[in-house]
């Protein structure tokens, strides 16, 4: 079983090599396992009563706890790629410890995605069985892995996102009592959304949902 701390240990920051035909590849959202991508639609989230359409938007918003207007702009986007692009002009103003906490934030985002989409996302995650999960990327060998051979079958990267998904899958296999349907706030400083501390997330989405400002016009 992959332990909770497996992604955190320094020795696990090394590049890994995968044979594409032997792993579950997360690449295009329309493919069989595309729902594992942070860019996948259809897995809505709700934090502090605020609707957020994708894990990508939530993750990017967590960069800027001290900039609620930027967070609002990011989570107000209908497209996950647009949400990501909205964060780019502000990257230099990311929380100062971002590089140290980003994998913890991503782990929390995936937990939220599962908690609030337990049946559908959980079923997809378990459908990977015990196979390695690898996010294929053209540029990013931190979260994913890049093709390095002309035949297109060798992927190399840290694959942090894939490893976090595998970590969550192992926890889900043992979750007979639905413990993963509740997600406590991450234990880091200034863990905030729109000027308020992020609260415990539960599986039950409230009917009293606030829309980000850019959704209201």
Image (cartoon, rainbow, N blue to C red):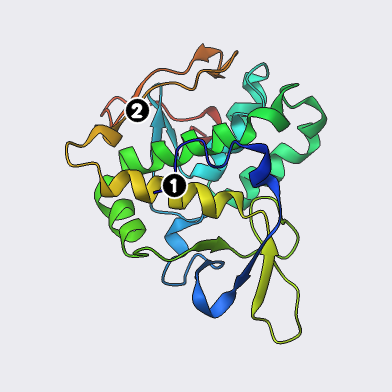
201 and 47: which one is in front?
Answer: 201
Task: Identify the image quadrant of residue 91.
Answer: top right
Q: CA distance from mark 1 to mark 2?
A: 36 Å
Mark 1 residue crowding within 10 angstroms, few (<14) / some (14–19) / many (20+): some
Q: Position of residue 80 (x, y in %)?
A: 57, 49
Most foreground residue, 155 or 42: 155
Numbered badge on residue 157: none
Q: 46 or 24, which is in the foreground? A: 24
Q: Earlier in the sequence, mark 1 or mark 2?
A: 1
Q: Residue furthest right?
A: 92
Q: Which percent across, then down, holds residue 25?
A: 52, 69
Q: Label 1, on which residue? A: 2
Foreground: disc 1 or disc 2: 1
Q: Is residue 74 above or below residue 119?
A: above
Secondary structure at badge 2 equals: loop
Placement of 212 over or under 138, stated as above or below: above
């Amino acid at each position: 079983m992959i332990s909770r701390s497996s992604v955190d240990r320094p020795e696990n920051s090394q590049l890994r090599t995968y044979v594409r035909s032997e792993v579950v590849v997360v690449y295009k959202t329309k493919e069989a396992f595309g729902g594992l991508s942070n860019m996948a639609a259809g897995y809505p989230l709700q934090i502090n009563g605020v609707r957020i359409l994708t894990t990508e938007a939530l993750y990017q918003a967590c960069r800027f706890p001290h900039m609620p207007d930027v967070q609002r702009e990011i989570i107000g986007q209908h497209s996950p790629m647009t949400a990501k692009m909205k964060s780019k002009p502000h990257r230099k103003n990311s929380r100062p410890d971002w590089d140290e906490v980003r994998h913890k934030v991503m782990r929390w985002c995936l937990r939220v995605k599962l908690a609030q989409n337990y049946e559908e996302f959980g079923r997809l995650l378990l459908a990977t069985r015990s196979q390695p999960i690898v996010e294929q990327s053209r540029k990013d060998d931190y979260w994913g892995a890049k093709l390095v051979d002309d035949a297109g079958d060798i992927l190399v990267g840290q694959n942090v996102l894939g490893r976090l998904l595998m970590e969550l899958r192992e926890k889900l296999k043992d979750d007979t009592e639905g413990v993963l349907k509740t997600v406590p706030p991450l234990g880091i400083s200034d863990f905030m959304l729109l000027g308020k501390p992020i609260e415990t997330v539960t599986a039950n989405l409230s009917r009293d949902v606030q829309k980000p400002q850019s959704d209201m016009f």
